[in-house]
Amino acid sequence: MSVAELDELAAGCLPGVLGLKFTGSEVGRVSATLAVRPELLAPNGYLHAATIIALADTACGFGCRSLLPEGSAGFTTIELKSNFLGTARDGTISTEANAVHAGRTTQVWDATVRHEQSGKTLALFRCTQAVLWPRQNRPATAVSEETT
């Protein structure tokens, strides 16, 4: 999908409400930015951790959509992890999400979140998505239904 198509898809949902803007989209890679503003900060005056996770998870999720196998019905995140290395109070944060594994049943994506003005890495993020299949299109498993 193009950057414009990703921005349109995000409109009206959490990524659009937060103000996330996509800056790049290619197979296996998605990048996006988000302007830091007061309502995205925690009560302590620093960027809320959930803001960073929303940026990274959105880029990974939109990337996952682009690599879904033909016939699949979608995906859902089954695990995510973030290591926070810094924070911000203003400026713009950005992320680049990259596919690590894109299989028929799972995908794994990594993202790095940075503060644009300082270049400082704020977080390292990894998520795993389960690929969803309609009942009739599910991949064969090692144990057939007849033996269970």
Image: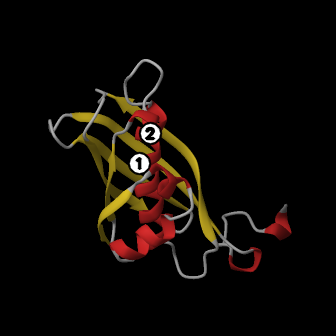
**126 left or right, relative to 106:** left
Callouts 2 and 1 close, C-beta under 8 Å: yes
* Residue at figure coordinates x 30%, y 29% from the top left: 89
Residue 132 coordinates in the image, percent (x, y)? 64, 66
Q: Amino acid at mark 2?
A: Thr
Q: What mark, if any, has residue 83 been given in the picture?
A: none
The quarter of the picture where the N terminus appears is: bottom left
| Residue 85, position as x, y percentages in the image | 29, 27
Q: Which secondary structure, mark 1?
A: helix
Give the quarter of the image for residue 141. Answer: bottom right
Give the x, y percent position of residue 138.
68, 73
Residue 97 showing in the rendered view: yes
Give percent across and percent down for residue 10.
Answer: 49, 64
Rendered view: 38 above or below 73:
above
- Residue closest to the eye, 58 or 10: 10
Q: Is residue 67 visible?
A: no
- Identify the residue position indicated by label 2 in the image: 51
**Residue at the image point whose x is 54% and y is 82% from the top:** 70
The residue indicated by pointer 1 is: 55
How far apart in space, not on screen, are marks 2 and 1 (Cα)?
6 Å
